[in-house]
Amino acid sequence: MYFLLGISLILAFLLIVNMAVAIGASALWRILSGHIEYLSVGTRAQIIFGLRVLPVAAAIVFVSAFLVPSYLLHEPTSSGEVVSTKLGLIALISSLGVAVALYRVVGTWLATRRLTEDWLKQSIEIKVDDIGIPVHRIKHEFPVIAVIGILRPRFFVAEQVLESLDEHEFAAAIAHEYGHLRANDNFKRTVLRVCRDLLILPLGKGLDDAWSDNAESVADEYAASKGRSTALDLASALVKIARIVPLGKGPAMPAGAFLIEDQNTDITSRVRHLIQLSETGGVVEHKSILGISPLIWLSSATFAALVILPFVDHRFLSSTHVAVEQFVSLLR
């Protein structure tokens, strides 16, 4: 029962801390979102990503640095405590969240791998200047132009895209996708999906949408940094591809960074932003410490301090154990 109680507490607090911090992070974003428009889209994307990952990170730090050490040091192996129905239910819900997250990550990876292999079988590799990874031309009913994969990324382009875009528009579209590649957006999307699944409840959807919008803007600005004409070429490419998106169809690829994902994709704000970039001649980046948002530095420093505290002063572990005992008593 000693180990069963410990495992139940770990699962329960992984969920409780995660949900509590997620609610706080979502509330904080509602406050911040209207006051950080002066920051670059890259910095905003970093802040949003940090807020989305913060709940899971906080839960892992609390459990590994406080709960587990305090339980091992202060909980008697023969205390006679049992797992109550309420505690067991919370632990079960948490374990379901972990299982769902694992299932979806593995399922998405397998489906993406299978579809990638299918696309490669009927693809023709084409030469694109200034691109260090393979670019494949494929036949697909959806106007695909995307970067797929994390460890071994590849570009895929549908034939109708090549037929619809001129040389400069295609180069601008590829530059946009390369912006996603440089920002490791496929990896970040996977991390965000795990964070979302672990919560069970649909908390943080606003953060997910905000990150996606800013990530697209970051990739647009990367392409626009090539020159004023490139910004206009990308805007033109977006309009042309949006016009040939078939009704009710999607790319069918579970994971990847697509220029346009479906017919419901709103390109109006992106086109307007690109036109503004063409007028200003590029993007004015706002400085942050080593290019990383201060929020991420602050979170990292806080987590480091939390991990070190129990080793510096064991009273923190004793206090944690008392608090956990009170929590267990409440659930009896």
Image (spheres, helix red, strand yellow):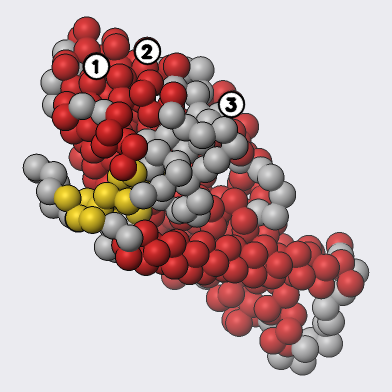
C-alpha span from label 3 to label 2? 25 Å
- In the displayed structure, does residue 110 sit left or right of residue 202? left
Q: Among all residues in the image, which is located at the extreme left? A: 129
Quadrant location of the C terminus in the rendered image:
bottom right
Q: Position of residue 161 (x, y in %)?
A: 32, 36
Left or right, 69 with respect to 231, comes to right
**Count of marks, rendered view:** 3
The part of the image, by quadrant, that contains residue 290 is top left
Q: Mark 1 = which residue? A: 232
Q: Residue at x 22, y 32 (%)?
A: 170
Crowding at mark 3 (Cα within 10 Å: few <14, some 14-19, many 20+): few
**Could you classify mark 1 by the number of other residues whose Cα lies within 10 Å: few (under 14), some (14-19), or many (20 or more)?**
many
The mark that comes first in sequence, 2 or 1, is 1
Q: Say if residue 49 shows up in the picture.
A: no
Residue receiving disc 2: 272
Looking at the rendering, in which quadrant would you find the N terminus?
A: bottom right
Between label 2 and label 1, give the one nearer the viewer: 1
Amino acid carrying label 2: it is: Arg
Does the residue at mark 1 contact the one at mark 3 (Cβ under 8 Å)? no
